[in-house]
Image: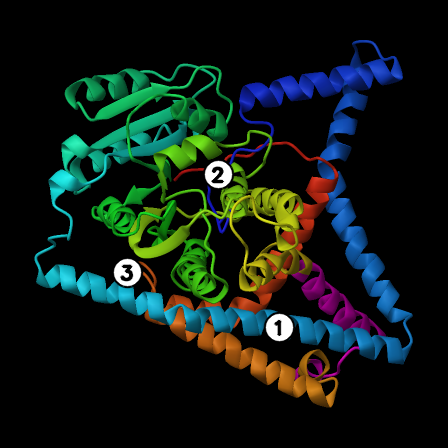
Amino acid sequence: MADCKEMNWTVAKNPVDLENNAATTRKSISERFGLRNGTLHDTLTNAALSIQDWTPFMLVTSYFVFSTCLYMFMSPKLFTVFWFIYLTTNFYIAGSTVLEAFMSLSPIRDARKQVRKLEENEWKFPTPDADLLTLDLLIVAYLPNEKDIIMGRINYALEKIVYPQEKIRINIVYNTPYAIEPLETEMRELAAKHSHLRIIKVPGSTSKADNLNYFLSLDTGSDIISIFDCDHYTHPYGPRFAVERFIQNKKIDIVQGRCVVFNANASFLASMISVEFDKIYAVSHPGRSEMWGFALFTGSNGYWRAPFLRQTKMHTDMLTEDIDSALRSLAANACIVHDTNVVSYELAPTQFSAFWKQRLRWAQGWAQASLKHCIMTFNKPQEGKRDFSVRFGILSLLLIRELSYYLVTQYCCLVFSIILLDFPKSPMALARLVFFEYPASEWFFIISAICLVATLVITARVKSEFTTGWNVLVYAVLYPIYLIFMAVIGLYGHARQITKYAAWNPTART
């Protein structure tokens, strides 16, 4: 989401770029200070690069220290005002979340009804095979990072996807700064055996956006183009479900499917991400679409009408080019729908370090895209009109969501300041301090807790086959900590955007 994915390149796109960027930085530093080659030069250059890397951390740390100290010296009346501001706004976020969850029940019901009907009809879809649209299925890869998994994805796509072979082309669109043999030869040999498989090595590419734009410059004659990151397996019927939506409604420009984490049992972290993705893709996305009247392409398992995608393309200057393309499509009043039957299975990070790097990329990319596109809340669309509900939904998604990082962390700083001034003498005293400092706090806390429980009950009803009820229960208990942690990551993303942080750390594929 991003409502996004694991393979998001940023400004420094691959190891070659990273080395060039570092060399350029070293040169500029040495020129600025008049340094020559030698130990002093290397020491100062490395120190400068280290400062650049640590600046976002120092900014976030300073934010927490300053905020906590500010509340410690604040007058009681002003303190109370801020307390209720944070409780009220966080209550709004909890309320919006549960409303989206309830609104998702209708599309969930419709999706299940469609599956039951197909099962009864022995999986015969409404459209005859001969009348299906031609599909270009793209698997986009940065080969050094995906070399261990890409052959498995290719063989799965060739063998498992249920779609007429003459109507589908499987395209492996990849870039690599150096040759990787014998893998590249094996891929080409496999393409020679399968007429509907194409292996496309993009010359001069340094990003996912470059790979996609290169493919979009080719005249393939397809009607639909689907985009997948290399860690994904599409459900065998996923492409068919998506294409049926385009055939049923000629106005649809994009169909975004549901992404499911299939390695939930690989680690505790992966199991929590699995619940998170069930909540996002099966509940929040379809609920938001019903509630606010718009949907988003989230970077992978998305199907586009080919002419519209060729017109939109990807902007290479954006950190999360997928979210940018989704918001530009929304600005153009494109018709985007979520379909929970269009399923793909993906890998979640199993180690905290990989998760941290991934989410920081997403946070910075969302900050950049939100700043660029928040004007949609107020301006006129390129075509047609934009309803109030859509405008308010965009306001909630781009502005309120980004501001929520400050609301959550400011509440934490406020509570922490009280703890420092008057440390609780028992766990019950701590609970009263955090949740029940004022009479109205009890109602805010109780209603917010009910919203959380209701949202997760709905999530449990639509959880994937890889998520257990125990996973959902643990996720529910840890959810307050999760909210705080994600708010800190959001702040860190803002700090990175302010400092123009550009280093790229690919998510490990295991």
Question: Toward the viewer: 252 or 346?
Answer: 252
Residue 355's x, y, as percent? 52, 47
Residue 228's x, y, as percent? 36, 38
Camera-near label (1 vs 2) is 1
Question: Toward the viewer: 454 or 20?
Answer: 454
Residue at screen point 12% across, 61% down: 119
Residue 40's x, y, as percent? 83, 17
Residue 92 got which mark?
1
Residue 422 in sight in this render: no
Q: Which residue is mark 3?
A: 465
The segment highlighted magenta reads: 404-430
Distance from Cα at disc 1 to Cα at disc 3? 32 Å
Q: Name the image quarter holding residue 487.
A: bottom right
The mark that comes first in sequence, 1 or 3, is 1
Q: Name the image quarter holding residue 498.
A: top right
| Type of amino acid at the residue the image marks with label 1 | Tyr
Secondary structure, magenta segment, majority class: helix
Q: Which residue is mark 2?
A: 507
Q: Residue furthest front?
A: 384
